[in-house]
Amino acid sequence: MRLATDCWYPVLLSRELRRRPVGVERLGRRLVFWRSGDGTAHGFPDRCPHLGAALSGGMVRGDRLICPFHGIEFDAGGACRHIPALGRSGRIPVAMALDALILREAHGFLWLWWGAPRAQYPDLPYFTELEDGWRHATITVDWPVHHSRAIENQLDVAHLPFIHRTTIGAGGETLVEGPHVEADEIGIRIWITTAKDTGQRPREAAELAAAAAGTEPTVSFLFPGTWLLNIAPRFKNVIAFVPVNARHTRYYLRAYHRREPAFVGSLFAAATCLSNRLILSQDRRVVVMQTPADSADARADRPLATDRAIIEYRRLQARLLERVDSPEPVAN
Ligand code: FES
Ligand SMILES: [Fe+2]
């Protein structure tokens, strides 16, 4: 699948990673993730270089991942440490090695660097304001869609009174003012204002920009796939979009609350997960039917000025996709 490169992609929740191999499809590849004895996360392509067995069917012992087929052992860097059939004194062929994926673990997620190794990596695309004092709860939702369509759905302002008529779009505010959008190489920020259409003229761009100045955006998106909805100063929703393959996207949809005492925040977050699941399910039937699957191919689409956030997303995606097409996982 085509993917923007030189980016951090969220691939798993931290809590999904244990001291046993986890085999998953991510970014159109079969990958295996595991924790060594000290708790550090590691990952490889899920294929043993010996005879192609899936390493995810194997086991972890200390700092080694052991293939289920003939017991070959790999360390966390991907070096082969033992080949039982050759014996303790056997010579290990140089080619019997794995490319270790470049990973970080933070904010409750495991992140995969997709691109060439670097001396220094950019910051993880996450919302650092959600640190101290926040409690969260997460649901996982899988859709048979390309991640570009899933992301654009969350940048789409005009669908609310139609798709979400019975929930967050109640009130019939079909007129979209602006929206005021700011975009750069890192992400997109949207200030959303909608109104009932009484024939009035929507406010001009300059007026909307002035109103937005010094305020928090309604939606913040960080490339390649994290999104924040600013519902209230102490209440946010976040989605980490995980490209599984060209026709499958996983959503990690997380509700954040900051309340006193802290356990109340946890209760609010758990309750919000129920409504989040309902609201997201309302979009599904329309988004799964959008064509073409990848919005990068959607040259026949006719976006409107009110779709400015989507236009900005496509613009930056196009630039990132130009860099390299589908690189292989890279070694540390
Ligand atoms: S295929 Fe993995 S040890 Fe043989
Ligand atoms: Fe929606």
Image (cartoon, helix red, strand yellow):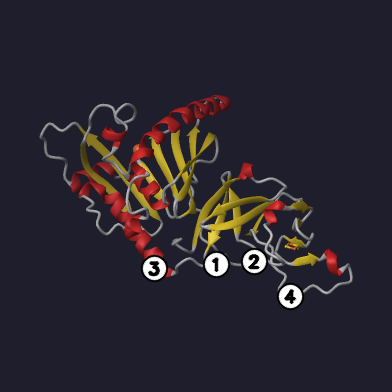
Q: Which disc number belongs to residue 94?
A: 4
Give the mark nearest the N terminus, 2 or 4.
4
Circle 4 packing at 10 Å, graded few (<14), some (14-19), many (20+), is few
Instruction: Give the quadrant of residue 324.
Output: bottom left
Q: Are marks 1 and 2 in contact (CB under 8 Å)?
A: yes
Query: Pointer 3: what residue?
Result: 322
Q: Quadrant of ligand 1?
A: bottom right
Q: CA distance from mark 3 to mark 2?
A: 25 Å
Amino acid at circle 2: Asp
Q: CA distance from mark 2 to mark 4?
A: 13 Å
Question: Residue shown at 52%/28% (left/top)?
Answer: 270
Circle 2 packing at 10 Å, graded few (<14), some (14-19), many (20+), is some
Amino acid at circle 3: Glu
Give the mark nearest the N terminus, 3 or 1.
3
Give the mark nearest the N terminus, 3 or 2.
2
Q: Nearer the viewer, residue 206 or 71?
A: 71
- Please, what secondary structure does the residue beneath circle 1 have? loop
Query: Pointer 1: what residue?
Result: 328
Question: Residue shown at 69%/57% (left/top)?
Answer: 55
- Please, what secondary structure does the residue beneath circle 2 have? loop
Q: Position of residue 297 (x, y in %)?
A: 33, 59
